[in-house]
Image (cartoon, rainbow, N blue to C red):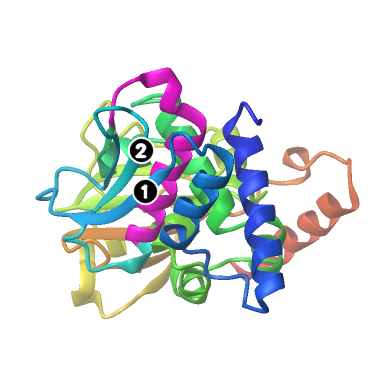
Amino acid sequence: MPTTWGGWASRVSAYVKQGKELLGQPRFPVRIAEIAPDYSRNVFPNEPITLVRGQDFQGKFEGALVPNEKRNEWAIFFDSGHASKGRINFSQAHEFGHYLAHRHFSGQPFYCSRRDMWGWDTAYGQMEAEANQFASFVLMPPDDFRLQTADFRRPTLAQFEPIRQRYEVSLTAAVLNWLKDTKRRAMLVVSRDGFIDWSWGSEALFKSGVFFKARQMTIQVPDASLAALGRRSGLTEIEHAAGIWNPTEPVFESAVFSEYHDMTLSLLIYPGSGADQWPERSEENHGIKDAFKVFQRQL
Ligand SMILES: [Zn+2]
């Protein structure tokens, strides 16, 4: 049996791929509610998942993983108040990840809120991050995701719309999955009422010293940003000169204003910062370097 979230994610992903091939069905979207009960019964016949059901959590939780009294059956609950199928599917996958990788560590039911689930930067803890990584891998397997995003040079949030539909995930989940692996300097900023709620940057951006400490301090979005202007700007993308999002660099911003009612999502793409940031190594890196030169010229 696998002992890590990654081991379980590979197994489940292979199971889904083979199963769908046998049935002659399309591989995507992967729907956890259809998979988790059968899969868990096969692997853990003495404590399977026997229920996947919506419940009104009144906005407090996205999902929960709960055993019965005898601890020989488990249920995945999700917040039935959500209109978004993508969020529901992702929450179910997240709880399925807890079931496979964590249920024996905790001994307690898992109740997962959005803030906890998306606090990928250590705020809540390792298990939340792992459950998200599991969900991202199973719903958006790396082999297919790379193909779907291969031509993303300077993507806008609109370009993630077909990705979100293909995998039946939220826009946030699709963008974070891209940021996790991209070599580009990019960041997702989630803001509300003109302030940054949280943000997540790619590794390349973080290493270049660009990040926001929105958890530690209150940070206002720039006045000229789409995050601040909202719908009334009539724009969904804009090329900012240096001095707006970043004091010394131009930034390409695209925004979506409505995914979570009062939330604004901004995807920020920063320019590449020269050859020193992309050391020799592989063919791929040379390709990226070239792409960045073109990109910088465009700016
Ligand atoms: Zn969780």
In the displayed structure, does residue 185 sit left or right of residue 187? right
State the image coordinates of residue 206 (x, y, percent, origin top left).
Answer: 54, 36
Report the front residue among 228 and 16: 16
Picture residue at 84% right of the left edge, 54% below the top: 284
In the displayed structure, does residue 92 sit left or right of residue 297? left
Quadrant location, ligand no. 1: top left
101 in magenta: yes
Viewer can see residue 247:
no
- Residue projecting furthest to the left: 58
56 to 163, vertically: above or below: above
Secondary structure character of the magenta stretch overall: helix
Report the front residue among 77 and 22: 22
Q: How crowded is the residue under tag 1: few (<14 C-alpha within 10 Å), some, or many (20+)? A: some
Extent of the magenta region: 87-109
Amino acid type of the residue that numbered disc 2 sits on in the rendered structure: Glu
User: Which residue matches tag 2?
Assistant: 73
State the image coordinates of residue 249 (x, y, percent, origin top left).
Answer: 51, 50
Residue 140 location, quadrant: bottom right
**Residue 50 disc label:** 1
**Mark closest to the chain's N terminus, 2 or 1:** 1
Report the front residue among 251 and 204: 204
State the image coordinates of residue 244 (x, y, percent, origin top left).
Answer: 36, 53
Circles 2 and 1, Cβ within 8 Å, touching? The answer is yes
Distance Cα–Cα, label 2 vs label 1 = 6 Å
Element at label 1 = strand
Viewer can see residue 62:
yes
232 in magenta: no
Picture residue at 58% right of the left edge, 40% below the top: 43
